[in-house]
Image: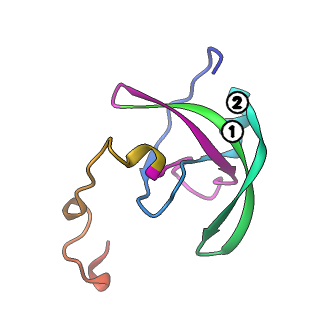
Amino acid sequence: YGNKSIKTLAKFDTGARRTSIDESILKKLKLPVINKEVSVKNALGKSKRKLAKAKIIIKGKEFEVEANVCDRSFSSHKVLIGRNIIFSNFIIDVELSHKSPNIKDIK
């Protein structure tokens, strides 16, 4: 939206229903905020998050999504790509990051 863009690392998260972006991206790009909040459940519990409209480009393919916004300043990945983008667009090969299906073998 607008003529600004940010190039950043993103992590594919098959457990996330919706794509999530860091608050700093929302502010820098002045993304349009949607007047509703969503409930998000994660390892830390439940929280309410605002939604913003975002255009995300992965490998030259553009996706217009409603992304939830949160503080990801603790992470090197300022964007989590959720199933709203992954589904029907990408295939995740877990063998590239995991030696076996056993939880103890996760990198």
Mark 2 or mark 1, which has the lower sequence index?
Answer: 2
Return the x and y of residue 10 as percentages of the image width and height: 46, 45
Residue lying at 57% horizontally and 56% vertically, measured from the top left: 75
Residue lying at 19% horizontally and 64% vertically, measured from the top left: 95
Write down the residue under mark 2: 31
Residues tagged 2 and 1 counted as in contact (Cβ below 8 A): yes
Relative horizontal placement of residue 61, taking residue 8 as reference (left or right): left
Residue 67 belongs to the span the image colors magenta: yes
Residue lying at 65% horizontally and 53% vertically, measured from the top left: 73
Q: Is residue 1 above or below residue 27?
A: above
Quadrant occupied by the N terminus: top right
Q: Secondary structure at mark 2?
A: loop
Q: Is residue 23 above or below residue 57?
A: below
Write down the residue under mark 1: 52
Gap between marks 2 and 1, in whole Å? 6 Å
Q: Is residue 13 above or below residue 34?
A: below
Q: Point out the residue furthest to the right here.
A: 35
| Disc marking residue 20 | none
Residue 40 belongs to the span the image colors magenta: no
Q: Is residue 27 above or below residue 1?
A: below
Quadrant of the rendered structure where residue 97 is?
bottom left
Quadrant of the rendered structure where residue 92 is?
bottom left
Q: Start and end of the magenta stretch?
A: 59-83
Relative horizontal placement of residue 3, taking residue 19 as reference (left or right): right
Relative horizontal placement of residue 102, taking residue 20 as reference (left or right): left
Task: Name which residue type carries label 1.
Answer: Ala
Task: Name which residue type carries label 2.
Answer: Leu
